[in-house]
Amino acid sequence: MEEKYGGDVLAGPGGGGGGLGPVDVPSARLTKYIVLLCFTKFLKAVGLFESYDLLKAVHIVQFIFILKLGTALFMVLFQKPFSSGKTITKHQINGSLKILGRKEFKDKKLNDPRKLVRN
């Protein structure tokens, strides 16, 4: 019975050099990523050190609030959500303000939000 597969797994389709093995990457491009990785590891270590000192002075709830607020502000600046997508029209803004200005909404006696919709 003839073997279906060859014995040399690393041999390529032509029988010559291997199809598997290390990939050639230009060293300049790789160096840039290694430096970036080391920089982020350094920033993480500094952040852990500073957060340890900060937690000695601040309550955990306040610390988490400050942390979430800082990351949210960073993401807003990074993603620029206000400069892309559809803009809200004046009609939509006025409709939202009308809903917030209604008596039922101000009294907080509203149990069913469908009551806000008037036919």
Image (cartoon, rainbow, N blue to C red):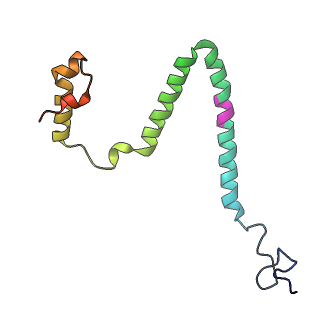
- Relative vertical location of residue 59 with respect to residue 77 in this rendering, above or below: above
| Relative to 19, 83 lies left or right | left
Q: Position of residue 9 (x, y in %)?
A: 83, 74
Relative to residue 51, is residue 85 depicted above or below? below
| Residue 103 placement, left or right of 57 | left
Residue 45 highlighted magenta (yes or no): yes
Is 32 part of what is drawn in magenta? no
Residue at position x 86%, y 77% in the image: 8
In the shown orientation, is residue 68 left or right of residue 84?
right
Q: Where does the image place residue 87, in percent across and percent down from the top left?
A: 26, 46
* Magenta stretch, residue numbers: 43-47
Q: Quadrant of the N terminus?
A: bottom right
Give the main secondary structure of the magenta stretch: helix
Residue 93 occupies quadrant: top left
Q: Going 21% across and 33% down the picture, which residue do you hit?
A: 96
Task: Give the image location of residue 54, x and y in percent.
Answer: 61, 18
Quarter of the rendering occupied by the C terminus: top left
Estimate the x, y position of residue 112 in percent, counting from the top left: 26, 26
